[in-house]
């Protein structure tokens, strides 16, 4: 996955145990890296962790969230959480080339 030149990208290869941080034209590679957990480090926000999704998983997750929001009776808090999550999952799906990301 590639993005704009000014975008920072973190790439993790669990099989070869390395982590690559790309910041524009600069790269930092760390190895060996074993058992990584990505965590958002903003003290103003609650703890949050990364979730690895491939294209088929993102595709299914977009569909499932949409179905739940339309058809399943859930609490207002759960609806709000899923409404907040859906655009992020759609963005991941689109970046991975899934047609569900284009909705």
Image (tube, helix red, strand yellow):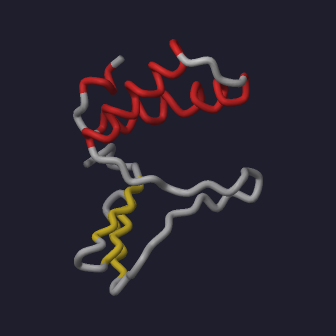
Q: Residue furthest bottom?
A: 32
Residue 45 vertical position relative to residue 68 in the rendered view, above or below: below
In the displayed structure, 47 sits above or below 80; it is below
Q: Position of residue 47 (x, y in %)?
A: 68, 57
Q: Which image quarter: residue 22?
A: bottom left
Q: Provide residue 52's location: percent of width, then percent of height.
A: 38, 54
Report the number of numbered marks. Answer: 0
Q: Nearer the viewer, residue 96 or 66?
A: 66
Q: Position of residue 101 (x, y in %)?
A: 33, 27
**Residue found 33% across the figure and 43% down from its top:** 4
Would you say 91 lies left or right of 84 here?
left
Residue furthest to the front: 73
- Could you say which quadrant of the image residue 25 lies in? bottom left
Which residue is found at the position 52% from the left and 13% from the top?
70
Q: Nearer the viewer, residue 29 or 33?
A: 33
In the picture as drawn, the residue positioned furthest to the right comes out as 44
98 to the left or right of 101: left
Task: Please state if 72 lies on the left or on the right of 65 as rendered.
Answer: right
| Quarter that holds the C terminus | top left
Work out whether residue 20 or residue 50 is closer to the camera in this orientation and state it. Answer: 50
Depicted 94 relative to depicted 18: above or below: above
Please give the name of the residue rendered at 31% of the width and 32% of the height, measured from the top-left corner: 59
State the residue in front, 75 or 58: 75
């Amino acid at each position: 996955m590639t993005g704009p030149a000014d975008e920072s990208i973190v790439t993790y290869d669990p099989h070869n145990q390395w982590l690559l941080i790309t910041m524009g034209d600069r790269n930092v590679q760390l190895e060996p890296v074993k058992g990584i957990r990505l965590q958002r480090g903003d003290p103003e926000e609650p703890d949050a962790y990364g979730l690895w999704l491939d294209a088929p998983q993102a595709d299914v997750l977009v569909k499932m969230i949409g179905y739940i929001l339309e058809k399943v009776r859930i609490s207002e808090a759960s609806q709000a959480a899923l409404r907040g999550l859906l655009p992020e999952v759609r963005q991941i799906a689109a970046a991975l080339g899934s047609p569900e990301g284009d909705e």
